[in-house]
Amino acid sequence: MPMRMSKFVKKFYKPEEVKARIEARQPPITGLIADVQENKKYDRPDLYMDNGGVVSLNTESLANLIEAWSENSDYWIGKKFELTLGHYKFQKHNDNGGWEDCVGDMIIVKPVSPPLSEQEKAKAAEELRIAEQNAKKDAAAYWDSVSRDRDAFDRDDNDPMS
């Protein structure tokens, strides 16, 4: 069976790359979403592109994609997007011991594929609700079984130490 080798390539895009393309008047970086995974280190989702590229989603990018394609990440797979440049404000210490206002660049992900209809968004929301409900039931069942196993272990009459 053939393997898709691009899944082993993980290139995280940086704002500098997007900015350089804009300054060079090149077309924006675009991609198709191959997967969405939680980045536990930064508590945000990462988009895995069909070409092996990866983009971490900031709040603005996440809001753009949710608005277009719903909260259900399964509905994002195969959708096309482009990377644009945005800015954020922050403060840093200056040499005089005070604070200095600064502006940084950040990647903004914008949907290119058409948005879902309201009917499709409702279906996506219902599927997500059911999946979350099932996950809670599965977790509860798991902890119930752990508790039963522990109780059985505690009552083990064949224990030579008791």
Image (cartoon, rainbow, N blue to C red):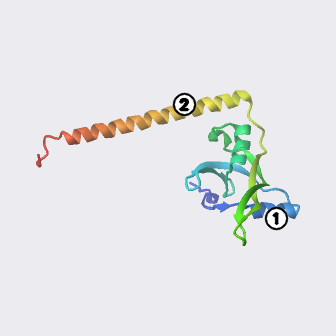
Residue 105 image position (x, y, % from top left): 76, 59
For the point 69% across and 47% down, the residue is: 59
Asked if residue 131 lies left or right of residue 154, the reply is right
Q: According to the image, label 1 marks what residue?
A: 20
Q: Residues within 10 Å of mark 2 (few under 14, many from 20)?
A: few
Residue name at image x 69 percent, y 45 percent: 62
Instruction: Give the answer, above or below, for where 36 lies relative to 126.
Output: below
> Quick one: SS at disc 1?
helix
C-alpha span from label 1 to label 2: 44 Å
Q: Residues within 10 Å of mark 1 (few under 14, many from 20)?
A: few
Amino acid type, callout 2: Ile
Residue visible at 43% across and 38% down in the picture: 139
Q: Residue 47 location in percent, x, y? A: 66, 51
Quadrant occupied by the N terminus: bottom right
- Asked which secondary structure carries label 2, the reply is helix
Direction from residue 8 to residue 98 in the image, left or right? right
Q: If you read the primary sequence from the N terminus, does the residue marked by circle 1 or circle 2 appear first?
A: 1
Q: Nearer the viewer, residue 116 or 152?
A: 152
| Residue indicated by mark 2 | 130
Nearest the eye: 151 or 21: 151
Residue 33 badge: none
Looking at the rendered structure, the kind of residue marked 1 is: Ala
Q: Nearer the viewer, residue 11 or 9?
A: 11
Residue 150 on image: x %, y % = 27, 41
